[in-house]
Amino acid sequence: MNIVVLVKHVHDENQLKVDRATGKISFEGVPGKISDFDRNAVEAALSLRGSVGGKVTTITVGTDEAVKALREVLAMGADKAVLIKDQAFENLDVRAMAEIISKTLAKLGPFDLLLCAEGSVDAYTSLLAPVLAEKLKVSLITYAESLQAKDGMVKAERALERRMEVVEAKMPAVVSVTGEINDPRIPTLLQIMGAMKKEIAFFTIQELGLDANRMLPNGYAILEYSGKSKERKKVVFEGAPAETVPKLIEAMAKEGLVS
Amino acid sequence: MVFPFSGLSDYEIKFKPEHEIFRKFVREFMEKEVEPRVGEIEENDQVPPDLLKRMGDLGFQGIAVPAEYGGQGGDQVSVAIFSEEAGRIYPAIMTLVGVNGLFTTPVLLYGTEDQKKKYLPPVARGEKHSAHATTESVAGSDVAGIQTKAEKRGDKWIINGRKAFISGGDIADYFVVLARTSPAPSRKERWKGLTFFIVEKGTMGFSVAKKMKKSGLKGSPIVELQLDDVEVPDGNRLGPEGEGFKVAMETFDHGRIGVAAQALGIAQAAFEKSLNYALQRNTFERPLIQYQMIDGYLSDMLMKLISARQLVYWAANLADQGRKEYLVAASLAKAYATEAAEWAALKSISVHGGVGVVTESHIERMLRDVEITKVYEGSNEIQRLVIVRQLLKQTLGYDSPGM
């Protein structure tokens, strides 16, 4: 089975700096990391390979920095890694991203399963899987919390807000996974060192027959990020509990917090 | 020359991309799988077997053992990275790994091919545990002062004696045991006549005598070992007869960087926790961080922390280049980092105030854990002798008289 996993090298959200006065978020000097649930997608791919055999190829779109994410995925056990690189790739919109990935897939040959995370920790649009499935005209399963593949079919439990859904789809399929699907493996030092020797394939978007300048105007671009904060009301009720508790309940009811 | 080294490049520290990846994964393991269980380990004075097994599966027990013997084939920088990240969360985890290093190192350096093939892979994979038994209640730094004796009978050795302060001895399957095999030729040559043997758990006459209670490094128990007419074949002799002192010294030279890095991790934790607390805690309606004396502590902590970090990874770099100068560097790093960490742990208690001595805060634990790092793997007093003696040897070819 040919499994493709999409990963994204993102800014570590725990290390973002926010200017207190303007609320602007600065990315300067913020280290990158592999987006959290991408590692769940990788783990899902590797465990599927473990049970049914096949190959796991990982693809990322980004700058040279993204090689770090690919090395981690290779250390975890992926067979092959592909980087589509271009310095103009900051702030690509989902449709442009889907275009790049579908062209890359065309170069790599047919796949059975394409896995990605339910969202990336930066923009968290959760749109890539559906847009990509539509573009590739293949089945789509989102928010998978478990995954099995057998006889050309993929079966998943979907974790939805109020219910669990068990679905089955024909392969090839695009599947997005949640963070609950598994615990991503930790590679050994030996595997990490082995991953440093594996080859990473590079493509530029020109090599994919695309033009970055033409892709962007069709979509949207993120111009700026800023932090949002909410002032707390800090209401204090003083007095004996017998008096203050009803006041608290009344105040909370007014806010619609209790009914 | 930039005394005592030959030039500026001798002070260089280099990391490879794989080191950073390894560090991130070790940190993930420590934070996700060790940290939540620290309370349990402190309480029971034991690392749960499933966690030990997990460490073995992740290759942590064989970082510096070559891949051909079941290890990870890692360098000293990688050992230091593991030790630091373990020290940052729970230093006993490093000791549980370090004791295996004190077994695998002499086997790697002096073992026969048969010994390497038999003993290294299971230890490196974490399937078996090992320990190093040199110290006795009467001889610690003074290795040549040990009383345990081994006598040759035919092609067998009979060992008698008692060992103390043996880390990991409670769970070890294999031990290296140092014994006197011939009397010292003279007072000046007391170091001659010692020999190492590999002793397996369950050998007749060999027993774990007593678990010793201690303040820190819970989860890494120390025990006494009793050897009564323990019989081992000559094939279990490790290294040449009478050369055990040399084997011991070389082993400790290798372990020193790990201990320095373990202390570095404690210093790192002390600094992170103190800074965090100083930002969050208000007193007299201002956060602690706005008080100059607190900032003085934090700045000094950071100075010591970063100095220790540079020393540790510099020593590890020199070791990986196979440079002799690493001996001085490792001793500098060990003495400095352990004392920096002790200072940071003490000041962390000052910053935290009463909270700092509450067990649940895990602040006072850093102080309990750091103390032994100043003592084992060559006490800091011994390091200060080694530094000057090694320096004279390295720069002037001057061999100063023994102790």
Image: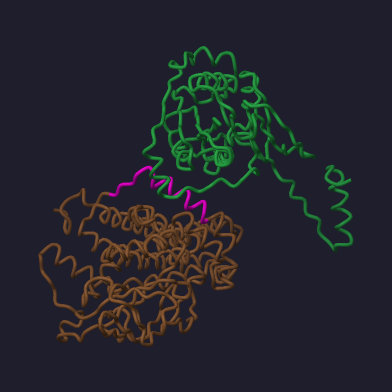
Give A16 or B89, whichever is nearer the viewer: B89
Give how far across and how far down residue B123 sits, in percent. Answer: 41, 63
Residue B19 magenta: yes
Residue B110 appearing in the image: yes
Give the left or right position of residue B310, taking residue A208 as reference: left
Q: Quadrant of residue B372?
A: bottom left
Give the left or right position of residue B296, taking residue B65 as reference: right
Q: Is residue B233 above or below residue A247?
A: below
Q: Quadrant of residue B147?
A: bottom left
Question: Residue at (40%, 66%) from the top-left corner?
Answer: B100
Colour assigned to chain A in the rendering is green
Give the left or right position of residue A121, taking residue B336 as reference: right
Q: Which residues are magenta?
A: B13-30
Q: Is residue A160 above or below residue A87?
A: below
Colouring scheme, one of rainbow, by chain, secondary structure, one colour? by chain
Give how far across and how far down residue B242 sits, in percent. Answer: 21, 78
Give B265 or B324, whichever is nearer the viewer: B324
Colour assigned to chain B in the rendering is brown
Q: Is residue B384 above or below residue A188?
A: below
Give B134 or B392, whichever is nearer the viewer: B134
Give the left or right position of residue B216, taking residue B177 as reference: right
Give B156 or B358, whichever is nearer the viewer: B156
Dominant secondary-structure state across the stretch colored magenta: helix
Residue B375 appearing in the image: no
Give how far across and how far down residue B224 sits, in percent. Answer: 43, 82
Name the quarter where the N terminus of chain A is drawn: top right
Name the quarter where the C terminus of chain A is drawn: top right
Give how far across and how far down residue B206 sits, in percent. Answer: 41, 82
Q: Is residue A40 above or below residue B356?
A: above
